[in-house]
Image (cartoon, helix red, strand yellow):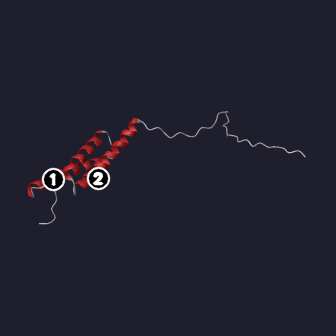
């Protein structure tokens, strides 16, 4: 009685031109796209920080919102409206800070008497 051994080989798929198929590469981002993405993030961050700054930490968050909005606008953000809102809210933070400083002679909110 004879035993035959069978070897299984794994074949890799090949394309019609004889070269191995390559996986599709993710699209490369250009420097301009990366700059716009960063600018969009700055626009949203300025809006959020300006909004939060109306309630707390307006000493810090107001100027940060102003700077981020100005940088986003200078870098050509696609979210121009958010950057303008961040600029407006950052300025409003500083106005609220000035109003609090002149009326209460303090830099924080006081809810009680």
The first of marks 2 and 1 along the sequence is 2
In the current view of this chain or complex, which residue is farthest to the right? 1
Q: Residue at x 22, y 56 (%)?
A: 56
Q: Residue at x 64, y 36 (%)?
A: 20
- Numbered label attached to residue 53: none
Look at the image and tell me in which quarter the C terminus lies: bottom left
- Residue 7 in percent (x, y) is at 77, 42
- Residue 45 in percent (x, y) is at 30, 49
Q: Is residue 20 above or below residue 103?
A: above
- Residue 64 in percent (x, y) is at 24, 46
- Around disc 1, counting alpha carbons within 10 Å, would you say few (fewer than 14), some (14 to 19), or many (20 or more)? many
The residue lying toward the viewer, choosing from 106 and 39, is 106
Q: Is residue 48 left or right of residue 92?
A: right
The residue beneath circle 2 is: 48
Name the secondary structure under disc 2: helix
Q: Residue at x 23, y 52 (%)?
A: 89
Q: Is residue 26 left or right of residue 58?
A: right
Q: CA distance from mark 2 to mark 1?
A: 18 Å
- Around disc 2, counting alpha carbons within 10 Å, would you say few (fewer than 14), some (14 to 19), or many (20 or more)? some
- Residue 47 in percent (x, y) is at 28, 51
The residue beneath circle 1 is: 97
Q: Quadrant of residue 102?
A: bottom left
Residue 86 visible: yes
Count of all numbered marks drawn on residues in the image: 2
The residue lying toward the viewer, choosing from 58 and 17, is 58
In the current view of this chain or complex, which residue is farthest to the front? 1
* Residues at marks 2 and 1 touching, judged by CB atoms closer than 8 Å: no
Q: Quadrant of residue 77?
A: top left
Residue 78 visible: no
């Amino acid at each position: 009685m004879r035993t035959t051994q069978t070897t299984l080989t794994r074949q890799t798929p090949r394309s019609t031109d004889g070269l191995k198929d390559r996986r599709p590469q993710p699209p490369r981002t250009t420097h301009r796209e990366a700059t716009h993405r960063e600018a969009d993030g700055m626009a949203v961050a300025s809006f959020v920080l300006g909004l939060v700054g109306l309630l707390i930490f307006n000493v810090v968050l107001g100027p940060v919102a102003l700077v981020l909005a100005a940088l986003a606008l200078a870098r050509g953000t696609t979210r121009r409206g958010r950057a303008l809102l961040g600029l407006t809210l950052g300025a409003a933070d500083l106005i609220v800070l000035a109003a609090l400083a002149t009326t209460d002679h303090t830099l924080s909110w006081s809810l009680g008497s």
